[in-house]
Image (tube, rainbow, N blue to C red):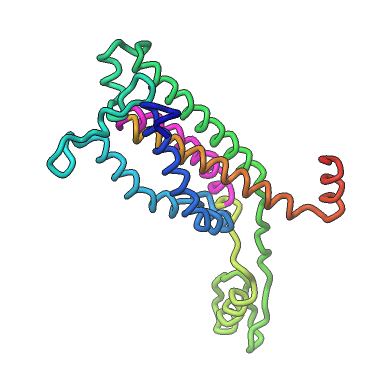
Amino acid sequence: MEPVLAESATAAAIVLFTVLVRLALHPLSRAAFRGATPVAGCLPTLLQLPVFFVMYRAFSSPEVAGAANELLGHRLFAAPLGSRWADALGEGGPFGPQGLVFLGLFAAVGVVAAWSAVRGRRAAAAAPAVPVPPVLPVAGPRGGKGVSGGAKGGSRGAKEGAGAGRAGVPAALSAEQQAAMRKLGGVLPLLSFGTLITAAVVPLAAGLYLLTTTAWSVAERAWLQRRKDRAARPAGQRVAAGRAAG
């Protein structure tokens, strides 16, 4: 990449390396998405932590294997990949040559975080409510009445009826639990803005990694959701949509 990108070749290599890591984790991301939980995708994120720490150390250590760390001299435009936001402020302020590079990074991270928050809130608002099964009496073996769903009875027949009710009726979330899950689904996307704080305290190289992997995560979930919605549509609507697109 050096003949084309010169000093920014290492920054481009970091982006390419991040894309390769996310491609390797894509099967896990798909499996997590099929789980349809607010915390879907936590496992791929945890598996990236060792890669992130290696990236952090590679652009923080002044020496590598007893020799000077040459990576610290590589740049993204005017900013060294080993520099931090505090270093940029001391080298000309927020609008200096290095400061502008960091401002561009923060702006890109903010756009991705806003996109993630909007999609997360829409998904939480569009989540269908799961009906709570009704509580129905169930006849016990001795004429007693049990309660479907697990209500306690006073007789042995009621207890056995309750056990039959629990075995025959699938578990479902209550209305309060569903409301709490929707609120959690709306709050979790806001955590993406925490990446801004991390990008301000880690080396620029690690910030590039965070930006790339976060953008990949949001785009990947949007693509998976689109495929899911398309597969859920009736065949006639898919044919009509294909003709309209053509």
Q: Residues in magenta? A: 178-203
Q: Is residue 29 left or right of residue 70?
A: right
Q: Quadrant of residue 74?
A: top left
Would residue 32 be counted in the magenta stretch?
no
Q: Residue at x 26, y 20 (%)?
A: 87
Q: Residue at x 71, y 50 (%)?
A: 229
Residue 209, position in %: x, y?
40, 38
Most extreme residue toward the front is 3
Q: Quadrant of residue 116?
A: top right
Using the image as rendered, state which of residue 6 and residue 92 is in the foreground. Answer: 6
Residue 145, position in %: x, y?
65, 79
Q: Quadrant of residue 198?
A: top left
93 above or below 151?
above
Most extreme residue toward the bottom is 142
Using the image as rendered, state which of residue 63 and residue 56 is in the foreground. Answer: 63
Q: Residue at x 53, y 47 (%)?
A: 180
Q: Quadrant of the C terminus?
A: top right
Most frequent secondary structure within the magenta stretch: helix
Would residue 181 be counted in the magenta stretch?
yes
Residue 47, position in %: x, y?
39, 53
Q: Is residue 57 left or right of residue 108?
A: left
Residue 50, position in %: x, y?
32, 50
Q: Residue at x 54, y 48 (%)?
A: 181
Q: Quadrant of the N terminus?
A: top left
Using the image as rendered, state which of residue 225 and residue 87 is in the foreground. Answer: 87
Using the image as rendered, state which of residue 28 and residue 36 is in the foreground. Answer: 28
41 above or below 158?
above
Q: Is residue 62 left or right of residue 112?
A: left
